[in-house]
Image: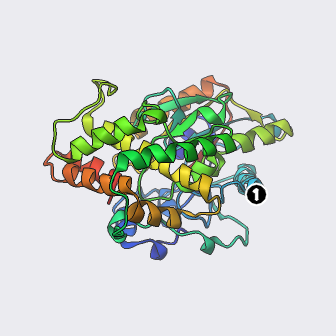
Amino acid sequence: MPRLDRLPPPNRTNLLNLPVQVNDTSPFRPLTKPLANCRLAIVTTVGVHRRGDRPFGPADQSYRVIPSSTPPIDIIQSHTSLGFDRVPIMRDLNVSFPIDRIRELAARGEVELAPNHYSFMGAQRDLLRIESETGPEVGRRLRDDGADVALITPT
Amino acid sequence: MLARVLEANGIATTAISMVREHTEKQKPPRALFVPFPFGHALGRANDPELQHRVLRAALDLLAEPAGPVLRDFPDDTDPGDQPPAPPQASAIAATAGAPADPKIEAMQMLPHHEQWLGANGGRTAFGLSGIPASRCGSVVSFLERFAAGEDADMSERSPDLPLPNFIRYCADDLKALYVEGYMAMKPAADGDEIAQWFWAETAVGQLLRRVRDRLDASDDARWKAAAFGVAR
């Protein structure tokens, strides 16, 4: 869920028309140390960014950097598709981008925070540039940041 | 796909999945399928306890020695109390008594929006156009001129931002002004109630339908895409 049969027809058709990669296996990098000693970053496809940053446009395969110290008040979403209800994220950013929640985890010593989070636009059809260019670039930046773990959150 | 790319670059990933059918095919290294509607990856707004349970379940996947791992969120949370998606403008008829002047109406929303800001520590979805809420009247006038077929523009639009994208951001800001203002008045309102009110009863809702119509009548794919995002 959202179970496809519960969606209104236009949304369902939209979803079924999204190209989906089919893979047999997955790259897998086992964690080699306790989570409490790992640095966590959020990588989201919910189209959030800092207020002053350039908003995402349609079919925008670039990404935005959100320093993990950014106050939530300075974060805004430019993924405004009518295909999902924006009311929850207007009420509470954490429902899609759990920046306060992971700070609470870090305060309890359950994980460390990486210096930056990264954000992409959602509802993309053509992903070629993310796959070949901007995705690997974020991977490299995460490594440079000393991040060990990325939590990926969708819309 | 993104999870696979990051994992291949040396980062251990754990992803929240909204569409099990897609995730089964894509096979990200670790994914937690959640039973929530789009826009609710972590469960529910202002429910930190549920959000922490989802977060914990996603992070627990990192303890798995091999993958890909696709696990269902082990929880009995009932997702049925939230609509899968808000109703669209085309499914909502305008009521006969909708106010006629969107500019006056928008200005009247401002105090409610300020109330929202005060109650939420200043957090707001408003701000994509770069034009402050206090100038929402000018934004409405601009969209009215555009909808009437005029060669309308605003000096605030950056030259490298295409006009249809700017119009979309203006429409998004007006929606944020209204939705947040409405929530300040009716804190318990859900997305369905707000969509019904906005598209049926507000003058700005009717203005955005007219903006959509002009964008949609264009042969330019970028205009049509913006139309689809303003109202559909």
Q: Is residue B78 left or right of residue A35?
A: left
Question: At numbered mark 1, what does the secondary structure look like: helix, strand or loop?
Answer: helix
Is residue B174 placed above or below B187 in the rendered structure? above
Task: Please report the residue visible at 50 percent of the width from the left and 26 percent of the height from the top.
Answer: A52
Compared with residue B91, is residue B112 higher up or lower down, i.e. above or below?
above
Camera-nearest residue between B186 and B59: B186
Which of the 4 image quarters holds residue B119?
top right
> What residue sits 19% from the left and 50% below the top?
B214
Residue placed under numbered mark 1 in the picture = B53
Residue A73 place in picture, x, y as percent: 63, 35
Direction from residue A37 to residue B46 in the image, left or right: left
Say which residue appears at 51% left-offset and 43% top-offset. B110
Left or right for B84, reference B104: right
| Residue A144 seen in this snapshot | yes
Q: Position of residue B79 (x, y in %)?
A: 63, 71
**Residue A59, position in %: x, y?**
34, 42
